[in-house]
Structures are given as structure tokens and as C-alpha cells.
Image (cartoon, helix red, strand yellow):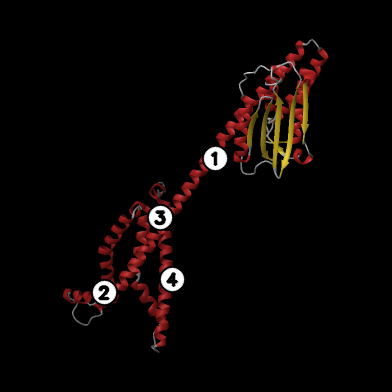
């Protein structure tokens, strides 16, 4: 993943990255050498020996030059080739390779100054003797420095790779969430586009029935009410939320239009519309399909009187809306398409997720739809 990122960088960025690595490593090693030299200096002062701190500090820096180059080049190499530490086996192989190549060169580096200070002749044999005369503690200490440097660089590079993967994962998740949001909005818009013609079609059917009665005054009153209903429907369909008051006022106007059609056969009873509920948030045109469903499967199926009962109740911050209608024994079932109930359920799922529910209760004499939704619009969902 890092290799993919680095492969797209230009040479200028690569040079800047390399200089940054060198600068950071230089500061770290200068800090380590300064702390180490200060510790040695304190130990020497306790033994009442006289020595200059600068000489100790320069000695520490000189002894750690190979480790500085190791950390810098190893960090840069792994930045370019992160696949080299993709598994524990590859890390161990790299460690063994550096143990056989870099570590002997490191020992040679600290041996050469000691060999040059020897009074005897500087022969190959004397150099070999000087090389093998390094104490076991020196071998152990220098190998510990080498191992520690390797381990720290590997850990830093693994952390960087993890951070890069997390960043890409978050970007991917964000992209998926944005795509999911766009799809949800598209589905919601599609539902709105289906809901609006469906309402207009049903309202026009009511007007058509009034016109056929040859009662012009009633038909004109219905057309006037229809214009108000259409105005609200067109405005509300472009909103995500309306107040319960606005929605219930619209339902009352819609039922008034239907009463022009059904006359005294339609009885309406609305209860529980308290100010606390009316100030809450409601999906636009949420209740009209349910009222239409009650009319289609009740009054359209017989010639008797019937009642549409709408009940509101508030429990904590949950509003329960029950819409019920009677089912006369001699009623002939209206087949219909069931769009009102299915679309309402889908809208509730999209807008409230798991915070809303819709239940259908049916008996021999009564049909009810019970919706429970939050009093106020959700903050997290669409």
C-alpha cells in the first residue's frame, strides 16, 4: 500500500522525504549521544578524574555514526519497499541479512581507530589480532545497539503502514457512506415522486365522483379544497419534515374533501392531538396514504355508514398514531395494490431506521394501522 503511494510521488517529494528522514534521525542520535555522554561524564566526575565533556560527547557521536546511517537508510528503504516487512519471516530474514553484512562492518569501524593507535606495525595480522581482541562485552553491547536500532525502525515503519492503511480504510468507509447516503436520498426521492402522483390521482377521483353527482356547488367546493391540498402536497413533498400540526391540518382538509364525496356515510373522529404532539416533527404526507387506504377498503366496499378513527398518544418522546376503520360483514374486499402501506413502511425504515415501527392489526370487524415514531426528527439519520 505504501509502495503504491510512494510510486506516485515525484522526485522532488522523494528528495524532501529523504532529507526529512536524515534530519529526524540526526536529531534523535544527537539526543541519544548527548544523554549517554552526560551519564559517562557524571560517572567520571565521581571517580575524581578530569576529562572534558566535549571529548566524551564526540566519542559517543563517532561510535554511533554507523547506527545513524543504518537507521536512516533502513527507514528510507522500508518506506520505498514496505513489502519487505509484510510478515515475521521477511523481517527475520532482513535482520539476519543485516547481522551478516552491516554488523561486521560496524565492528570493523570501531576497531580501525584502535588499530591505528597501536605502536606496533600496522599489518594485516595485527589488525586481525586487534579485531579478535574486542571484549565479549563490546560484541554484546554493539550487537544490542544494532538490534535495538533495527527493532525501533521496524516498529516505526509498521506503525506508519498501519496509519496509512487506517487512513485509506477511513476514506473508503467515508466514500461508501456517502454513496449509501446518495442511494438513500435517491430512493427517498423516488418514493416522493410516487407518492405525489398517487395522492393527486386519488384526489381527482374524489372530484370526478362529485362532478358525476351533478351538484355543481358541491363540485366547485371540492375543486377549491383540492387546490389547497395540492398546494400543500407540492410544498411538503420538497421537505424532509413538517410539523404534526401542519400534517393534521392537511388530513382534516383531505377528509373534508372526501366528506363531500361520501356525505354522511363518512364519520371522522380524531383524538389526542395535544399541543405537545402538534409541535413535533412528522414526515410530510405520512398519514394521507393510510387514510386513503382506510377509505378504499371501507367506504368504497359498501354503502353503509362507517367511521375513520385517528388516535394520537405520547409516551416519553414516542408518538403512537393509530388509524382504524370498521369492516362491515357485507363489505366486498377492494383488491387494490397495497402501495400506501408498503410505501409508508419503507419511508419509516429509511428515515427512522430502527427507531420507528408499523403494525397492522386486523379482525373480523376492524382494521388498524399503528405507527410509533419519535416526537422529534432524528439527528443521525437522513
First in sequence, mark 4 or 1: give its number.
4
Q: Specify the label residue 31 is tagged with.
A: 4
- From the image, tell me which residue sits under label 2: 111
First in sequence, mark 4 or 3: give its number.
3
Q: Is residue 112 left or right of residue 38?
A: left
- Front-most of residues 56 and 192: 192
Looking at the image, residue 369 lies above or below residue 118: above
Q: Horizontal and vertical percent for residue 221?
A: 81, 18
Say what secondary structure mark 1 lies in. Answer: helix
- Front-most of residues 192 and 363: 363
User: Between tags 3 and 2, which lies in front?
Assistant: 2
User: Between tags 1 and 2, which lies in front?
Assistant: 1
First in sequence, mark 4 or 2: give its number.
4
Neighbour class for label 1 at 10 Å: few (<14), some, many (≥20)? few
- From the image, tell me which residue sits under label 1: 178
User: Between tags 3 and 1, which lies in front?
Assistant: 1
Q: Residue at x 25, y 63 (%)?
A: 100
- From the image, tell me which residue sits under label 3: 15
Amino acid at each position: 500500500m505504501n509502495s503504491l503511494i510512494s510510486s506516485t510521488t515525484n522526485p522532488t517529494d522523494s528528495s524532501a522525504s529523504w532529507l526529512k528522514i536524515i534530519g529526524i534521525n540526526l536529531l534523535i542520535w544527537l539526543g541519544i549521544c548527548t544523554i549517554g555522554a552526560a551519564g559517562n561524564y557524571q560517572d567520571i566526575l565521581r571517580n575524581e578524574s578530569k576529562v572534558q565533556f566535549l571529548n566524551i560527547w564526540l566519542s559517543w557521536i563517532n561510535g554511533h555514526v554507523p547506527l545513524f546511517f543504518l537507521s536512516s537508510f533502513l527507514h528510507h528503504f522500508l518506506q520505498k519497499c514496505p513489502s519487505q516487512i509484510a510478515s515475521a519471516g521477511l523481517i527475520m530474514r532482513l535482520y539476519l541479512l543485516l547481522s551478516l553484512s552491516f554488523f561486521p562492518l560496524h565492528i570493523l569501524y570501531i576497531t580501525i581507530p584502535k588499530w591505528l593507535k597501536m605502536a606496533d606495525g600496522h599489518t594485516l595480522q595485527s589488525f586481525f589480532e586487534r579485531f579478535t581482541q574486542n571484549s565479549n562485552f563490546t560484541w554484546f553491547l554493539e550487537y544490542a545497539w544494532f538490534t535495538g536500532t533495527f527493532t525501533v525502525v521496524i516498529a516505526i515503519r509498521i506503525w506508519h503502514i498501519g496509519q496509512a492503511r487506517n487512513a485509506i480504510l477511513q476514506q473508503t468507509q467515508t466514500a461508501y457512506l456517502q454513496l449509501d447516503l446518495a442511494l438513500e436520498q435517491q430512493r427517498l426521492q423516488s418514493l416522493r415522486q410516487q407518492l405525489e402522483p398517487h395522492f393527486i390521482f386519488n384526489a381527482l377521483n374524489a372530484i370526478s365522483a362529485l362532478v358525476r353527482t351533478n351538484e355543481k356547488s358541491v363540485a366547485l367546493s371540492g375543486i377549491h379544497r383540492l387546490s389547497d391540498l395540492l398546494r400543500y402536497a407540492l410544498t411538503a413533498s420538497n421537505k424532509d419534515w413538517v410539523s404534526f400540526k401542519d400534517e393534521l391540518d392537511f388530513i382534516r382538509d383531505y377528509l373534508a374533501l372526501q366528506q363531500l364525496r361520501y356525505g354522511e356515510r363518512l364519520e371522522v373522529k380524531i383524538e389526542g392531538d395535544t399541543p405537545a404532539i402538534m409541535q413535533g416533527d412528522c414526515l410530510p404526507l405520512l398519514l394521507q396514504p393510510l387514510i386513503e387506504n382506510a377509505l378504499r377498503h371501507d367506504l368504497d366496499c359498501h354503502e353503509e355508514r362507517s367511521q375513520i378513527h385517528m388516535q394520537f398518544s405520547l409516551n416519553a418522546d414516542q408518538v403512537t398514531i393509530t388509524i382504524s376503520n370498521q369492516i362491515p360483514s357485507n363489505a366486498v374486499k377492494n383488491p387494490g395494490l397495497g402501495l400506501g402501506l408498503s410505501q409508508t413502511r419503507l419511508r419509516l425504515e429509511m428515515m427512522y431506521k430502527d427507531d420507528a415501527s408499523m403494525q397492522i392489526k386486523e379482525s373480523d370487524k376492524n382494521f388498524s394501522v399503528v405507527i410509533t415514531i419519535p416526537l422529534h426528527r432524528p439527528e443521525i439519520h437522513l
